[in-house]
Image: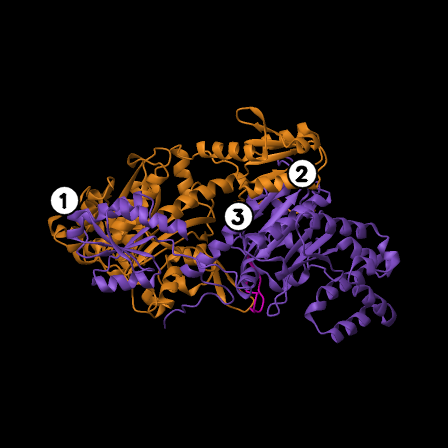
Chain colours: A purple, B orange
Amino acid sequence: MSLSTQPYKGARDFYPPEKRVQKYLFSVMRKVAESYGYEEYDAPIIEPIDIYLAKSSNEIVNEQTYAFDDRGGRKVTLRPEMTPTVSRMVAAQRQELAYPLRWYSIPNLWRYERPQRGRLREHWQLNVDIFGVTGLQAELEIIELANKLLLCYKATPDMYVIRINSRKLVEYILKDYFKFESDTVLKCIRLIDRKNKIENDEFKNLLVELTGEEKSVELQSVLEAVSLDSLPEDIKQHSSVNEVKDLLSLLARNGVENATFDITLMRGFDYYTDIVFEVFDNHPDNPRAMFGGGRYDGLVGLFGAEPVASVGFGMGDVTLLDFLIVHDLLPPVHSETDAYVVLVNEINDQTQQVITSLRDAGLNVAVDLSTRSVDSQLKTAIKKGIDFVVFIGAEEISSGQFTLKNLLTREETKASVADIVTTIKNNAQKQ
Amino acid sequence: MSLSTQPYKGARDFYPPEKRVQKYLFSVMRKVAESYGYEEYDAPIIEPIDIYLAKSSNEIVNEQTYAFDDRGGRKVTLRPEMTPTVSRMVAAQRQELAYPLRWYSIPNLWRYERPQRGRLREHWQLNVDIFGVTGLQAELEIIELANKLLLCYKATPDMYVIRINSRKLVEYILKDYFKFESDTVLKCIRLIDRKNKIENDEFKNLLVELTGEEKSVELQSVLEAVSLDSLPEDIKQHSSVNEVKDLLSLLARNGVENATFDITLMRGFDYYTDIVFEVFDNHPDNPRAMFGGGRYDGLVGLFGAEPVASVGFGMGDVTLLDFLIVHDLLPPVHSETDAYVVLVNEINDQTQQVITSLRDAGLNVAVDLSTRSVDSQLKTAIKKGIDFVVFIGAEEISSGQFTLKNLLTREETKASVADIVTTIKNNAQKQ
């Protein structure tokens, strides 16, 4: 019996065309993160399971981790998210690092879920975090950067909305205003987090179960507040309301036009402590949360170090790709290979010298070593999506003039090595 | 009790300075591979354990894999090497792909070993493979590319040697010349593979055990052949000897000066079928095999597809880094951040506008949001290793002239936004 050629279920093989798309996604991530002064870091894909037990969601740790015992009996898992890892790394060098610290990474993350649209068992996720800034300038920068990313992918502000909420406000409402027990508070947060994913009636029933008939009606009306101003007067007095207001105003003044308050926004993780945000796709075919983040000031402290003010977000490549496709924003990506050499005669040392000159001049050059007919070799170049073909044979070598064919325009010219280099480089600049 | 801040044993955290070094290593890999027309691919880090059972070494599969059962009961492992994966991917699209196929990847690989110099439990490994070329041109290109890589890291040919052998020749010697049983052949290959890692006496004793007193003496004298010409006459007649000779001559004529025949070179994996090679570090402090590869024509066929001629190599980042360090070849790597903004007064919308202009002009700019003294902010810039500091306060904004300080030369100038951009870009070009 032969072995299966399929990749592991819910995970992706990246053939060169798909890898090229991923390289485009990653290059924009790196460019934007670095333009804001963020430095790239990385860490092992294996982490001790302990670091997720305290503050990730229970659902993730108990049902979705790729957890196992290593050959030394250590309880480990493939990382399901990066925030505990980055907090561990900051804690390890808490005293030596220079704050504000700006770090980013594009790790591969794994969760055992039922594969579906926008959700696979693995994805690559841009993580951007700033450490050591207590004020709203941190939230402003992080959200501005997230917005800038989408603009750099050629999105326009009408395509998405940035929802903002405050965990402090939510806790105040549930704990102090409604006076729920802390267990009920947690369950309410989890239920509200699922509000947009379940039917309205189901949500109502579950809320009644949790909070009783009377309070559930009142809580629902609070959750229907469309703006900070439409919150009940007592709630509006809370300091977190002003904080959200200030952030929205800062964002508007700094070019982020489409941020809005959303009292129902929770974000799944238990470690968020204050402002949370989420970027939501407005497209009717893909109405879903794309990515988000927030402030999580307590996490570094779990590793025995003094806590550090921390704000960040994570953006996955799978949801990003869905967004770009549904809005028709994915640019054509070209082959990395500039020219394909078709061999008219057998390859020899002189042929190799010509090819080496082309490479030394900075061109990426593949050679057809199949010893098939010129026509078959040409068809291979077309199939590979390479723009230029150079024909090399004994005659070409003795004259120093090669046939250069542009496969897009079908134009053919006689050209020296220097001419070939110039033509192909000029063409690349035009693209 | 607080959580440990250490990374998983035998694996590495990459803080920004180490990540910068890795980015340099990877960028040279990508540049050289693409210059030869290789296209990047990738695949999930999890694979079914099955694909390693047939042709990887038993030691790896039974003792060194990170194997586990997933939540659906599938027997999987973190990939210990990339060759079975790339063979699986080629098999899956055997008919649709255009040959010769040139692919490369830089996957993260995991093996449960005792961590030691040059060997961790994880590494990143450049894999370069060409598919569909039966002749020696494939070996020439792959070895030439490996050699080019080292040259691009500024190595000189005296620093390393490229050892070449033929699995066909080894099998002919053991099976046909010495007439060993196939089990003994396999054990001999494994033993010879360890020859340089164990004491000479131990090797002799083990060889006697395997082959008997008389044949072991003769085999040892064959293994001491320093060149193709010093092999016994009967062996020299075998076609594989001419093949190695042709390859060495092709390499020499194409600029690879330091390739040499080595009858004791085996390479661990069972899937090699013909030419194998290995790059060996000549440095007295690091005398070890750095990386290698060879021809493995049968592997794609294990996945139920028609076999494809395949030649490739894998080069790990840990051994590469050891090589570059021991030969003092690692260049200084600069921060990705071009300028650090020190805030003389509180940040406001006008400050943000200046910073945005600097970013829009293509500079990577970090801002000190700590609200500490100017002096403390300056010290932070120095600690981060950023070359330029821009001081922004109310006065600077109203005059449009900012103090720009070069932290390397300690030079200070008054400069407009445009001047800042020009100065920093000119400086970057000089580096």
Chain to which mark 2 belongs: B
- Magenta highlight range: A109-121
Residue A391 shown left or right of residue B82 in the figure: left
- Which residue position holds label 1? B229
The percent coordinates of residue A330 (x first, y second) are 50, 60
Front tag of 2 and 1: 2
Disc 2 and disc 1: Cα gap in Å? 76 Å
| Quadrant in the picture for the C terminus of chain B | top left
In front: B109, or B63?
A: B109
Q: Is residue B275 visible?
A: no
In front: B293, or A274?
A: A274
- Which residue position holds label 3? A30
The percent coordinates of residue A305 (x first, y second) are 68, 41
Which residue is found at the position 11% from the left and 49% from the top? B233
Chain to which mark 1 belongs: B
**Vertically, is B69 above or below B28?**
below
Label 1 sits on a secondary structure element that is helix
Which residue is found at the position 40% from the left and 42% from the top? B320
Which of the numbered marks, if any, corresponds to residue A8?
none
Which of the numbered marks, if any, corresponds to residue B351?
2
Q: Main secondary structure of the magenta part?
A: loop
Q: Earlier in the sequence, mark 2 or mark 1?
A: 1
Q: Are marks 2 and 1 on the same chain?
A: yes
**Vertically, is B414 above or below A77?**
above
Chain to which mark 3 belongs: A
The percent coordinates of residue A13 (x first, y second) are 45, 62
Label 2 sits on a secondary structure element that is helix
Front tag of 1 and 3: 3
Q: Is residue A369 visible?
A: yes
